[in-house]
Image (spheres, helix red, strand yellow):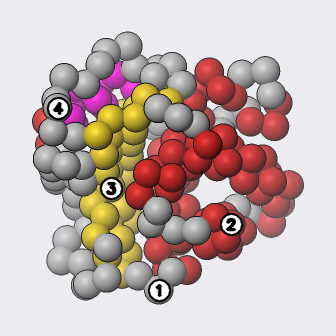
Amino acid sequence: MNYDILLAGFGGQGILFAGKILAYSGLMADKEVSWLPSYGPEMRGGTCNCSVCISEQPIGSPLVVNPNVLVVMNTPSLEKFIDKVQPGGIVIVDSSMVDIKVERTDVKVCYVPATELTTGDPQLKGGANIILIGKLLAETKMFTEEIFKKALEKVVPPKKAFLIDNNLKAIKIGMEYNC
């Protein structure tokens, strides 16, 4: 098990939060983990990405240059990072926010209309990032739902604990979505 994950989108889409949950999931599964957030000076609405490494072996660098998993929530991020994905890698795209298709044939691409799937359900508001993580979990089998739930309980602050069930609902939607 060695995942070099890059999550990318605009600030405010929950990229860093999603990366943090993945990192905590790795900790809960007794893996070696690194989490490296990066965002532009604009913050909300600006560029944002997050490198997450999860491995059985010690991690040499927290920076993911050539991911084997790419999760993107906007078109500029897909354009910027798609050519860096390792052959045989997985690309998960929020097709509600990305208006282009991946032309590479050496990676597995999953188009999930995550943002669209959150509309109409107030419990899912802001949960597109978690839907994409659900799809990532379904594709990689890197963690069980139970490990993810423990990580979520650790990351979500006590005053927002009421959102845990909403996030678990979003994970299920992502896991069950056929791309």
- Give the image location of residue 147, x and y in percent: 61, 72
Q: Earlier in the sequence, mark 2 or mark 3?
A: 3
Disc 3 + disc 4, Cβ < 8 Å: no
Question: Around disc 3, counting alpha carbons within 10 Å, would you say few (fewer than 14), some (14 to 19), or many (20 or more)?
Answer: many
Q: Is residue 153 visible?
A: yes
Q: Which of marks 1 and 3 is nearer the N terminus?
A: 3
Residue under label 2: 149
Magenta stretch?
72-82
Gap between marks 2 and 3, in whole Å?
20 Å
Residue drawn at x 61%, y 43% as measured from the top left: 176
Q: Earlier in the sequence, mark 2 or mark 1?
A: 1
- Give the image location of residue 65, x and y in percent: 16, 53
Q: Is residue 118 magenta?
A: no
Gap between marks 2 and 1, in whole Å?
15 Å
Looking at the rendered structure, the kind of residue marked 1 is: Asp
* Residue 153 or residue 69, whichever sits in front: 69
Q: Is mark 2 on a helix, strand or loop?
A: helix
Disc 4 + disc 2, Cβ < 8 Å: no
Residue drawn at x 36%, y 81% as measured from the top left: 32
Q: Which of marks 4 and 1 is nearer the N terminus?
A: 1
Gap between marks 1 and 3, in whole Å?
18 Å
* Residue 45 or residue 20, whichever sits in front: 20
Q: Can residue 39 be seen in this view?
A: no
In-image side of 15 versus 177 (left or right): left
- Give the image location of residue 66, x and y in percent: 16, 52
